[in-house]
Image (cartoon, coloured by chain):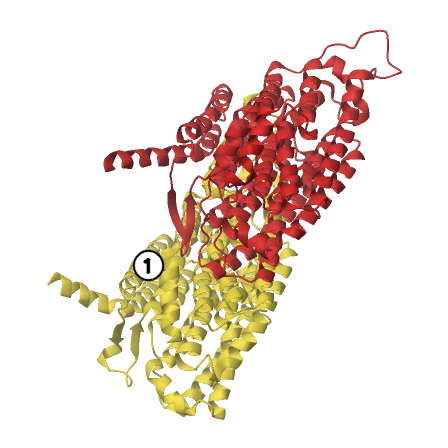
Amino acid sequence: MSIRIMTAMMTNEMLLMACIASPFALAALTALFHRAPVLRDALNLLMPFAAPAALLLLAGGPASLQLTQIVPGAGIAFTPEPVGLVFAGLVCLLWPVSMLYSLAYLYQNRAVRMTSFLVYYNLSIGCALALAFAGNLLTLFVFYEALTFCTYPLVTHDRSREALAAGRFYLAVLVGSSTLLLLAAMVWIYLAAGTLDFVPGGILDGRIGDEQVKWLLLLVVFGASKAAVMPLHGWLPRAMVAPVPVSALLHAVAVVKAGVFAIVKIILYIFGVDLLADAGAGDWLVYIASFTIIAAAVVALRQTSLKKMLAWSTVSQLSYILLGAALLKPAALLGAVLHLLAHGFGKITLFFAAGAIQTKSGKTRLDEMRGIGRAMPWTMGLFTVAALVIVGLPPLAGFSSKWFLLEGSAAAGGHLPAAVLLAGSVLSAAYLAPVIYRAFFVAEAPAADVRRPAERREAPTAMLIAMLLPALMCAALFFAVDAVAGFTAAAPGFSAEDAVGDAGGDAGGAP
Amino acid sequence: MSATAADALLAQLPILLVVAPLLGAALCLLVRDARLAWGLAVAVSAAALVFSATLFARTGGGLVLEYAVGGWQPPWGIAYKVAPVNALLALVLGAVFLAGVVYAGRSFRRELRGRRLQPVYSALLICQSGFFGVAMTDDLFNIFVFLEMASIAGYALVASARTPRALTAAYRYLLMGSTGAALFLLGIGYLYLVTGTLNLSDMAPRLQPALGSPAVVAALGFIGAGLLLKAALFPLHLWLPNAYGYAPSAIAAVLAGTSTKVALYILIRLLFGVFDAASFAAALPDVMMVLAPAAIVAGSGLAIFQRQVKRMMAYSSVAQIGYIALGVALVTQAGLTAGLVHLFNHAIIKVSLFMALGCVVYRAGDCRLSDLAGLSSRMPWTAAAIVAGAVSLVGLPLTSGFVSKWYLVSAVLEANLWLPAFVILAGSLMSAAYGWRLVEAAYFRGGESAGGAGGVSGAGGGSGEGGQSPVGGEGGAAAEDNGGGNGKSAEAPPVMLLTTWALIALNFFVGVNPSWLTSACRGIAATLLG
């Protein structure tokens, strides 16, 4: 009996290890086979399925890895828990998709330094996965920092003057804030609680005053500036000089999601929802997230470049997740987690579509999008689906997440969050709809030959597949909300009896 | 039987650590072949590392080794006494000197071309003997003698580059170092006057009744000023940038890891072992508490604007000494632990950086920022070593620098000092700023031509640069693989790279698994604070 349990535990731990190690292993293999491009590319297409497979087999079974001890009581440790597993699931699902797209994009655009690109891409994925499974704050911090440095070569991949300047800014903001604020917060937590372990319900209860809780949360939210809360958001639009697959990595898979995940995880497992609610510390985060939602959406309205507009949209949408976390209500937390997924799937499709348009026609400005829907119907069709996810219409995942966010804000009382959520959706429709309208309903350029029907220059099949899969996931997620709700019910603050159970039935069954 | 023989040998280790390098120094002058002299120096240094590691391991259990020189019992004779704090310093010295001497073989042959190298090795061993003497002895005057012996050898070593700049730098080092020594000696004189003894263990209780007297106050002032000058705590650092910047690379590496550390060690011993740091001598930690943050800001700030990279690293040392001094100045268990941890970590980080720069000098003749251009494709291993050193200085997680930073920040916050905590973190950002100048120079300048011609084919991907920091070592491997694609790699000799990377490996080892070091330092701090 005990032997069987031990074997099961060992298997779980090995699966966990395999899941985390697979991107790092792929990075090493890619570097090793840099002179055998066919083998290198085949590995990069196939090996990304290893992590999702391992994750599926693991399926949240109990596992815990303790690798080393860096400070007394805290070292590198991995422990899966529901919220982390959801984030890991996002990364695992999007890893194969983005590798497929990256390879297609790199070959189509005749990119140089492909090996180095692939190595750092895989390393970044690995850091994000390790971060998702972090068993304590120190591990989270280690991989949070490592992620910055692994993505830097990708942001500056073009080596242009502009790219280098953006890269310097990227590092300055991300490393600066995490060193000055997040590290300080971590040391503070360690001194107060004597540990850095992630414990359901938090480790700070009774060890820190109400006023201090507010300051500490301030340090955490601005320290994890990957979450792009205003005013520490500027690095994200500037990083748009990077190649499109890197934007996808930044916006959908790893970087910004790592930021919001870190904040959510710290709220749930370091502070504890109850402590924050008692101290009233979530209030200012609600205001700041609300401001970011509206302000970034307004800026997005005024953009002239498609990629820049999508970047500002990300800034706005990320704060939905933070708003959900800051409301500290079960339904809002579920909404936050769902939005993490929905925005990831939706935004990656949008960026992939933007990259396909740029690859095929060289068009990047919004006013150049006229008639592009006729030239690339599939691409723009999927772009439209993804845009609906961001706006939040059924039957797509964006609707479910916003539904629960609204429900959470109703539970929390106060009209501001609900109004902000709705206004944000209207604004997102306002900046996304003109693109779609121009693409499908406006002829290409008035001066050009109008009589000749626009030439079909559809994106390569590989890119289309990479866009289609996340779009399908958006639809699937809409119908699988119950499953996610059931899965996260075990996490602290998500308690099922309060709101999740019956509301989940509403959203899952009603449409 | 064998156990007693081993114990008998163990008892001789303290004196062997001093005598062996001294004998080696004499022998070096006698041999005709410079390579033989090098071999001799390596053998002696290797033995010294084995001895000091043994001492570190044996004293870890709380064992204190005592040795009476010539059989004269203390307090009349000179006593050697090895407690964990001595063993820790000896371990740092042993590691740095072995790496430095091994490295020096090829480095000297290039940088000191056409020179007789035997005297240089000899001076290096005299310096080693002197520093080990400081670490082993329990006699205050003996400390002074050994310190001067090492320092004078150090002045000569800096001057051995024989360039006008190096000679000027050595002269300034000599003047300021001797001033420091004179002040230190004066302080020792006062202490001897008051207590009538020079034995440190004997002195503390005798000094206790006289603690408030003017003579002891004067002694504290003179000793403090002298040692802070030797330790190059800002603003007494003026000798350091040029001495490290213009000395031969191997010498800069060795001195960077040892000379200031030894002065700080003496300061710690006297502050906590003889004077009462918490009450009577509190003025000195107070002064250091002001100077240390200033050192961090000024040193890092000046480092950012240096074009000569060795001088940049020297200014960085000024800042790092500030970190150690800050930890010590807290006069708490946590603070002293942090200071000692960083004393060890900074030694290995900075030595590995100076060694990597020496590799650049080996090929390029100098190491201005412009000499680093395109380094990633010409010398991928060297470039990766510089990156590894830079990220350790910044204190990224999994490097030893992170461990230091963690202990320092938590010690400072524990004492409720928010401003110094901010200074520490801001200082690490400033070190990121100058570290970043190195990375940009090595990876983003002058490397374009190598990558451009590759075109579409897969092989083109291999000719580019590795890119960023070797987090977890992967990046280093990638950089090497990519660099190999050029086929015109002009790396430094393997022995120089190996010693550099051995220290970097030690650095990452401490970063991942620091408990052996931190628990030793915590024990030492507890003992010193009594």
Query: Which residue is at a point 50% across and 88% down the rendered structure image?
Result: B218
| Residue A84 on image: x %, y % | 49, 39
Q: Which residue is mark 1?
A: B49
Query: Which residue is at a point 19% across and 66% down the rendered structure image?
Result: B7
Question: Toward the viewer: A301 or B176?
Answer: A301
Question: Most extreme residue toward the left, as rendered?
Answer: B1
The residue carrying pointer 1 sits among few (fewer than 14), some (14 to 19) or many (20 or more) residues within 10 Å by Cα, namely many
Q: Quadrant of residue A298?
A: top right
| Residue B112 visible to an observer of this rendering | no
Q: Quadrant of the C terminus of chain A?
A: top right
Q: Callout 1: helix, strand or loop?
A: helix
On screen, residue A136 above or below A487 = below
Report whether B106 appears left or right of A255. left
Question: Toward the viewer: A205 or A457?
Answer: A205
Report whether A255 appears left or right of B336. right
Report whether B294 appears left or right of B2. right
| Residue B206 on image: x %, y % | 36, 89
Question: Most extreme residue toward the right, as rendered?
Answer: A447
| Residue B405 on image: x %, y % | 50, 58
Query: Which residue is at a point 80% across and 31% down the rendered structure image?
Result: A304
Q: Colour of chain A?
A: red
| Residue A160 on image: x %, y % | 69, 35
Task: State which chain disc 1 sits on.
Answer: B
Question: Toward the viewer: B451 or B44?
Answer: B451
Question: Toward the viewer: B345 or A509?
Answer: A509
Q: Quadrant of the N terminus of chain A?
A: top left
On screen, residue B339 above or below A174 = below
Label 1 amino acid?
Leu
Q: Colour of chain B?
A: yellow
On screen, residue A411 above or below A118 = below
